[in-house]
Image (tube, grey):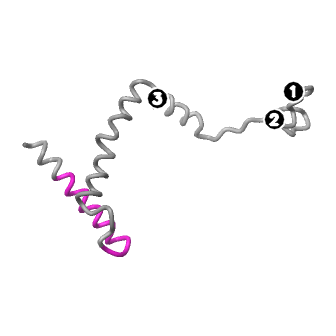
Amino acid sequence: CESCSELKRCTSNKKFVKTITRHVWEDSKERVNQHRLSPVGKSIYARRKETVERSFADAKELHGYRYARFRGKSKVQAQCLLTAAAQNMKKIALMAA
């Protein structure tokens, strides 16, 4: 690197050494991305739209998640919990039928 014409763009180190700093969780993030981009991970991620995203869409459209009906964190949290309970009861009823 010492004689490289691009040295100024890479490093300003006096010993002409480029130092790469990685975050503590970088290995974990790489493993997760590797799994997500595998064929199995892609199929799992594709189903996410059908399950998780659908649940939020139903809550928004059918159960008043679009706007909070009350003021205050505790009251809005209660609304969210009641909505989740209603969705779970609907799911149980559909599975039982």
Q: Position of residue 66 (x, y in %)?
A: 32, 62
Magenta residue check for 82: yes
**Under tag 2, what secondary structure?**
helix
Mark number for residue 35? 3
Q: CA distance from mark 1 to mark 3?
A: 35 Å
> Which badge, 2 or 1, comes first in the chain's sequence?
1
Amino acid at dot 3: His
Q: CA distance from mark 2 to mark 1?
A: 9 Å
- Of 14 and 43, nearer the camera is 43
Q: Position of residue 84 (x, y in %)?
A: 25, 56
Numbered-mark total? 3
**Residue at 85% across, 31% down:** 6
At label 2, the amino acid type is Cys
Query: Which region of the structure is painted magenta?
Result: 70-89
- 17 left or right of 32 in image: right
Q: Quadrant of the N terminus?
A: top right
**Dot placed on the residue nearer the N-terminal end, 2 or 3:** 2
**Residue ID for mark 2:** 10
Query: Counting other residues with Cα less than 10 Å from the Cα at mark 2, is it few (<14), some (14-19), or many (20 or more)?
Result: few
User: Is 23 inside the magenta-drawn segment?
Assistant: no
